[in-house]
Image: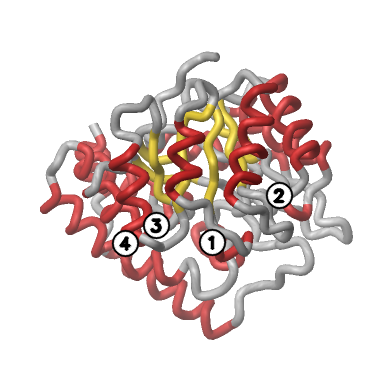
Amino acid sequence: MTAIDLTGVFPAIPTPFHDDDNRSIDFETLRRDAQRLEAAGVDGIVPAGSTGESATMTHDEHIEVVEAVIDAVEDVPVIAGTGSNNTREALSLSQRAADAGADALLLISPYYNKPEQRGFVDHYRTIADSVDCPQIVYNVPSRTGQNIEPDAAVALASHENIAGFKAASGDMTQISEIVERTREADFSVLSGDDGMTLPMLSVGGHGCISVAANIEPERTCAMVGAAVAEDYERARAIHHELGPLFRALFVETNPIPVKEAMRIRGYGPAHLRQPLTRLSEEHIDRLDAVLSDLVDGDHEDEYAEAKR
């Protein structure tokens, strides 16, 4: 297995769609967006995750999106979302993404089935035993209905192909325990919730798989970079600057708000596949105001310098 540095900022990118009956994938915009983020200094890109509306894509589309991002970027790793509630399906997607050249894989925990803890461990080990590619376990109980407990996370950290844990449980006590118990392992704990990124970094987390970084990549990188360098005064200042954006991007189900933010910023269309629907007008107005405030206070060169 080729090692990967899972420290820093990894935007979970939306999948842009055309405004046609099938909401076909807009590959030109997808490639351009990946290149924009790479130029902004992110540490990797995550296509075909929850933010990428993977649940509404066919398996072939899934891999086509991953391949398009791999082809678009030059130097940053691509972490492909390949999870499923069906272990065989997740295994197939993972192998296909690895064969396509993905640098690592992000696997959401099995949803709907609600396995017990030993089921989580067996699921991830089955895939890790078969696919020789760094893998990130993704815990997001609000979407899956079941929480991966610290004992299971620690057990998985011992597998040579399981390189990280994306934590989106909202439970800092649990997240801190996972960080504490895996400190000696070659294992990264990443925030899956933008508002929790700085608190997680303060207890030893390694970075974030971020929604907000699609909109404010330089600021997000500067915040994480400052925290990793233990400049918490600077990190806190940027965290509070971004706080209104963190909240605005989750007023409705992700990726509804971030796609609207992409439209407002001119990065891509806001089209979504059903059953998701466009952001409500009241929330569009709020999001527009938040984005305007960020532009008014922008110091892009300063954030780029902080990142370096």
- Label 3 neighbour load within 10 Å: few <14, some 14-19, many 20+: many
- Amino acid type shown at disc 3: Asp
- Amino acid type shown at disc 1: Val
Disc 4 and disc 2: Cα gap in Å? 27 Å
- Label 4 neighbour load within 10 Å: few <14, some 14-19, many 20+: many
* Contact check, label 3 and label 4, Cβ < 8 Å: yes
- Label 1 neighbour load within 10 Å: few <14, some 14-19, many 20+: many
Tell me where residue 127 sits by quadrant.
top right
- Amino acid type shown at disc 2: Ser
- Amino acid type shown at disc 4: Leu
- Label 2 neighbour load within 10 Å: few <14, some 14-19, many 20+: many
Q: Is residue 168 visible?
A: yes
Residue 207 spot, x, y in % from top left: 35, 42
Mark toward the start of the polypeptide (4 vs 2):
2
Residue found at the far right of this picture: 21
Disc 2 and disc 1: Cα gap in Å? 15 Å
Mark toward the start of the polypeptide (1 vs 3):
3
Please tell me whether residue 172 is drawn above or below residue 84 in the rendered image.
below
Determine the secondary structure under disc 3: helix
Residue 242, which numbered label? 4
* Contact check, label 2 and label 1, Cβ < 8 Å: no
Foreground label between 2 and 1: 2
Residue 254 spot, x, y in % from top left: 58, 63
